[in-house]
Image (spheres, helix red, strand yellow):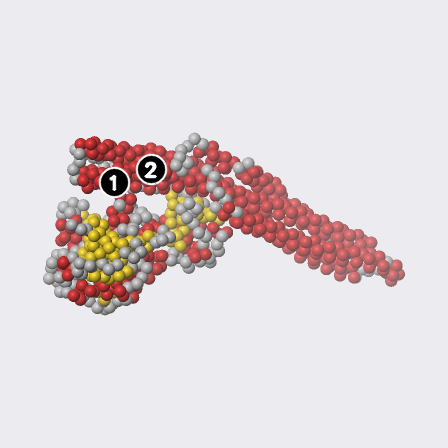
Amino acid sequence: MSFLRGSANYVWCTTSVLGKGATGAVFQGVNKNNGEPVAVKTFNQLSHMRPHDVQVREFEVLKKVKHENIVKLLAIEEEQDGRGKVIVMELCTGGSLFNILDDPENTYGLAESEFLLVLEHLSAGMKHLRDNNLVHRDLKPGNIMKFIADDGSTIYKLTDFGAARELQEDQQFVSLYGTEEYLHPDMYERAVLRKPVGKTFGATVDLWSIGVTLYHVATGNLPFRPFGGRRNKETMFYITTKKASGVISGLQTSENGPIEWSRELPQTCQLSAGLKRIVTPLLAGLLEVDQQRIWSFDRFFCEVTDTLCRKPVHIFNVHRAGLIKVFLHPEEKLIALQIHVQDQTEIMPHAQILLLGETPLTCLVEESTPGKGYPDTSNDKPLMLFSRENNNVVLPTETELPKFPVFASLVSVENDASQAKVACSVGHVCKRRIDKLALCSKLSRDAIEAFSGLLSTELTRVLGKCHHSKEFTKAMEDTILAIERSETFARHVFRKFGGGGQTAVDVKNWRKELDAKSKELTTELTPAIVQLHQRYVKEGSLRGEWDNSTRGLWCPWMTKASQRAATLVDRLRDGWQHLLRDRATRSLTYNDEQFHVLERIKVTETGRRLKALLETECTPAMTQRSECVADWYKMAQTVFLQTQILDKDIDAYEHALESFSYRLSQESKERNENLLHSLDRLPGKLKTIEKTNVPAQESTKKWRNICDAQEQITMLLYENGLFIDQVDNLSLIDRVEDIGDSQYEL
């Protein structure tokens, strides 16, 4: 019997089955002309019994659609032995989404990045169908294929248009197609329960199928699960039709037992809390039985676009030793980010310290900067979140780890393969938790470095302000000295020429007032700042405290816990594959059975080692490091608060000094003007005036020169202050530019 079949330009082997359905099968084939692999869909006798217009409908739909997220039609040809037409399509080597979800790694749903890719590509493909007034009517993971492009990127594509047809937005249909777990309840009632219900159906039935598919992709399970599965059809119909609006899942765990309803995605789901907040309302809108409440296609496409355009902001919450993710809309501002952070961490916006490297986020973005202008972050390089009001570090409570299965004492190739698959699934859960703990141990160290850098920067800045204040004070002292000298000179002039004008030139004691103000700076602020700077910047006491407290502690990142977990999971998968091959043979020889038993032992022992790595090494190590972080942050937070208080005190002193300077300038100016007027009115005899005319003019000239010099000194002091501020700003810019070049040192 020949397994080779072909058409004019393609050949395929019936043993290379890619998939089977009610009306045909898909095989892997080859283009005779260039050797390119293809997928060939053939049709069985049942398919040929359908009306002719139904038979050609799939051909017409495939000819009409052309989109990156729809499987590409290559040709429609006649099979050489006269068995009818075949459809030749591009080969999707990644397999179907159903097979991907069936892998033990995805027992609890796809990773977040892959889920978003499915969401993007599924909605794009569906939008193309709706733009062409087409309804698919059999959407499910089995009809979504994974295509690996030449550059290695993944593209998900819709396939199997055997049930597709043209349908306007307001049109209805009565024929029944689809897979029962993904059917809209109205269609389920007729197609599965066989009830004679006179209902028609619209294009929105695809929306329900999309909702079920997305829930399946996100969690690894169907949203509505009666006890016993397909055999309990009435309960399935009850769950889907009696659920309240907003409920996205219903689970029955025992025969005739109660239904466990839920409006949230399960904790075992791999999606972040930030994405769950966006996806959950989307699922609720799609899984509505009421035709008045279910979303329209336009709203679905709009919500997906809104979700995909958001910028993911990765944040490491030091106080929970865990990563969170905020999906920031391109137009949302800083306050929106802070509120999103508050929703996930309960840290109020005013108490949040967000650092990128050693630089506060507020130094990198303005309050009005839109989300699209925010710096890029990642799991490895997130923003660091500290609280001004809390210095505790509490590890989040994880859900209970699924139990590794125990093999039965008797060998059963069927059960053993299933148990090994469960062991792989639990192994992947262990690995993900180990990866998380290892990464968080690294990020804890990064957070310590970031906050230490912030403290160093702040102390250096405050010390610079202190020096600036001292220079300003010295300049004021010089100004006062010049004023005192000028007024003393004026007093001598009045004594010599004026006699009765002494009252007008009484010298005001500016120096005493300035000394009283500068006493706080010289005796309290400056010594405190210098001491903090010496201890925590020059000597690096905080970094030393961290090194001392963590010396001798296990670090999951340093001990390469993730790499070891990956090796153990690979061993689990090898054992599972071996037992799968044994199941395919159905019966084992004596020698094969001995190796089969050894594989069971290997799977059991590997699972035990993986669990021990998580529970006896990584979790205790991270608990100890979290305690060290809490103790360290209590010290660092105290220093940070002291620095802020000193900074405010310096600001208050500078403000007082500026007020004093302004008052000094105004009052000395008034006194100068009064003195000049008094000089012009000096009494005396004409002869005396004539004799002393030249000296008096010279004295007046000297006095005016002194006034001019005073104004020049004031201008120089002002320009000096501006120059110092510019130098401070340039130093800050240099530190920001150096962030990208800094490397992690553990």
At horizontal 45% and vertical 42% (from top left) the residue drawn is: 447
Among numbered discs 2 and 1, the one appearing first in the sequence: 2
Q: CA distance from mark 2 to mark 1?
A: 15 Å
In x, y percent, where is residue 33? 29, 57
* Closer to the camera in the image, 322 or 556: 556
Placement of 200 over or under 374, stated as above or below = below
In x, y percent, where is residue 249? 23, 52
Residue 232: which disc?
A: none
Is 659 placed left or right of 281 in the picture?
right
In x, y percent, where is residue 452? 50, 41
Whether residue 216 is visible: no
Q: Secondary structure at mark 2?
A: helix
- What residue sits right under mark 2 in the picture? 567
In the image, which is nearer the foreground, mark 2 or mark 1? Answer: 1
At horizontal 43% and vertical 47% (from top left) the residue drawn is: 382
Q: Secondary structure at mark 1?
A: helix
* Closer to the camera in the image, 586 or 230: 586
Kind of residue indicated by mark 2: Thr
Is 160 placed left or right of 509 in the picture?
left
At horizontal 46% and vertical 38% (from top left) the residue drawn is: 746
Kind of residue indicated by mark 1: Gln
- What residue sits right under mark 1 in the picture? 577
